[in-house]
Image: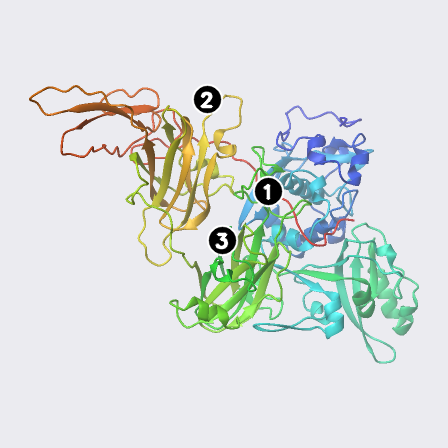
Amino acid sequence: MRAGRGETPAPARELFRDAAFPASDSSLFSNLSTPLAQFREDITWRRPQEICAAPRLFPDEPWEGQVKQGLLGDCWFLCACAALQKGRHLLDQVIPPGQPSWSDQTYRGSFTCRVWQFGHWVEVTTDDRLPCLAGRLCFSRCQREDVFWLPLLEKVYAKVHGSYEHLWAGQVADALVDLTGGLAERWNLKDLAGSSGQRDRPGGQEHRSCHQLLHLKDQCLISCSVLSPRAGARELGEFHAFLVSDLRELRAQDGQGILLLRIQNPWGRRCWQGLWREGGEGWSRVDPAEESELLSQLQEGEFWVEEEEFLREFDEVTIGYPVTETGHLQSLYTGKVLCHTRALPGAWVKGQSAGGCRNNSGFPSNPKFWLRVSEPSEVFVAVLQRPRMCRADGAGRARALVGDDRTSWSPASFPGKDYQAVGLHIWKVEKRRVSLPRVLSAPPVAGTACHAYDREVHLHCELAPGYYLAVPSTFLKDVPGQFLLRVFSTGRVSLSAVRAASKSAGPGAALPAGEWGTVQLQGCWQAGQTAGGSRNFASYPTNPCLPFSVPEGPGPRCVRVTLRQHCQPRGSEFHPIGFHIFQVPAGGESPGAAPLLLQEPLLSCVPHRYAQEVSRLCLLPPGAYRIVPSTYLPDTEGAFTVTIATKIDRPSIHSQEMLGQCLQEVGSLPLACPGGLRSGGLCSGHEALVSCRESPGQSLQLPEVQGLRPRPGHLGGLRRGGRLVQSLPRPRLSSQVSVMAVMKT
């Protein structure tokens, strides 16, 4: 990578340089597998003021900010970006207003935007150095090249995914969700052409047609795509996404109605040779004044097509749900505001809750959710998958996933994804205490037509007041994965998980045979301080971090760790909880190494479960460890107890027999100790030597040590007399995309 040539002198103040997403090959490429690789030696990085004389973030006129695609195959993302131009509130949600521009004294060379990821808006900051070829932007740009909101947003999205190359190919629907936090639908145009737009689904009928798009064009983004070109329209390319920028109903001179669609090609050039091209014979059917008016509206890269041509030459339409200024979605079918929303995470766990589709006998074991509808409502229920193929490293970039760790979320779309075929079904029940086999053997009131390899699937239905049982499933049995169940409704609804009986042994349950020493540590999660949520979130390192150690011995020790939350078993008061165990390197943590909590855990008790207790029985070698208990979502408050039970390998007991006296035996037993304890005396190293005395006719009683606190200097999260957990650098979340047919050209 060469530095930019002919750069103007930098201001006296030092401008921000993003070390996590540097101006280097590592930010451009993932594996050099795309055509971008041929430009590797020619791409330079320049700031906007080094590209043009007077850069600006936003345009004065809408057409100046129209999206144009460069060398990168991210037409799917650029089409979704056009949705932000439908309303200023959409643009302000993604690009926070008030950021210093290049002419401001407070300009520091940084840019911040928000991306929606698995239920939360995440702020991402990077510098404004952009990839260029021969001094011009080589990836996305606006119609006026001195407008920079689009290439800067593209860079942030590339950072979230790990590199620009990871944006090569994806789904418009996935990017729309990432930029709006809402829903998106894909319509198969061949279904519309073959069924006159009428489509049946359990739970009601949905009328879909090109004429329906007339009522949606001003409220939401409409995109169309070509998966494989027809013989007469190869100029459209393949696996390419377009924008539908307008629809017009005309009256032909013979009295027949004509529906025309204005299509915009992100390539920025006209590529249509159909009947309604400029000078085409289709215009002979309408008044010349209408022809002149419609042709004068075309911008660079736009063309008109008739409905019949559209259905024949294009394959899919993607529609983003309208978002009001208050942040609520609107129904595509009725226009009603979906002002009530609910969301809960869930997981398919192999051997436990991954029951597969309704063809499998294990279907009842799938995760189940109670949906209570308080009034007649139009309801949308969606299942959003989380990919398993990548996770974020300490710098906030995507990297390869190690083993079967499924604890990090990566939002949308790059090759290498691992989405499963998923579906969703809903049953009406009379009450919450039901016979599950009887309910599931009946037809559902709503369900997906099939299991689809999409990141998100959803149902649209009209529901009467009452209780409903929602069951998301994968097509295959024993396929692990995690998901977010979302509900959008016009009326009041509540959503809760159906809790399965916990199989975890609690602190008071019987331990396996043998002698065990137990230690209990108490702490709490406090919003904004020590409630960092799961490893999906950048705030994870703020969770309580509890030190403990396994004493030296002939080999690994058997240890059981139990996390118990302090809440009453009523209603839905249990939070989804879990924990990870990290091993401290021998000799302690190195100053230059990545923080311990940003590394891979040695053991995990995940996915997070709606249970009062969760536990893990394991073998741990001697050494120092950290336990990090967490709730699934950040800022979820509650108190907890962690119980560490360590099996004791009793040493030989040396005794001396005295005639005429009771036999007394004294021995020293090692117990697992949380980082070295001071309790009436000095405890050195990682063992506490507990003196025990055994008399004839009595059983040996091991003292139980409670209320332990970490030593000063250890990371901790105890709020009752303990130290506040040390704040660690927060990693960025990353992501990847997976689809059956991805837009890339």
Q: Is residue 78 above or below residue 281?
A: above
Q: Position of residue 530 (x, y in %)?
A: 40, 38
Neighbour tally class for label 3: few under 14, some 14-19, many 20 plus, Cα within 10 Å: many
Residue at x-position 80% and y-position 65%: 310
Q: Give the amino acid type for the residue marked by disc 1 in the picture.
A: Gly
Mark 3 or 2, nearer chain start: 3
Neighbour tally class for label 2: few under 14, some 14-19, many 20 plus, Cα within 10 Å: few
Q: Is residue 169 above or below residue 543?
A: below
Q: Position of residue 104 (x, y in %)?
A: 64, 35
Q: Secondary structure at mark 1?
A: loop
Mark 2 or 1, nearer chain start: 1
Residue at x-position 87% and y-position 80%: 254
Closer to the eye: label 3 or 1 = 3
Closer to the eye: label 2 or 1 = 2
Q: Is residue 649 left or right of residue 130?
A: left
- Residue situated furthest front in the rendering: 659
Q: CA distance from mark 3 to mark 1?
A: 38 Å
Task: Name the mark on residue 98.
Answer: 1
Neighbour tally class for label 1: few under 14, some 14-19, many 20 plus, Cα within 10 Å: few
Q: Where is the N terminus found, in terms of image quarters?
A: top right
Q: Secondary structure at mark 2?
A: loop
Q: Which residue is mark 2?
A: 586
Q: Position of residue 117 (x, y in %)?
A: 57, 48
> In front here: 718 or 442?
442
Mark 3 or 1, nearer chain start: 1
Q: Which residue is mark 3?
A: 346
Q: CA distance from mark 2 to mark 1?
A: 48 Å
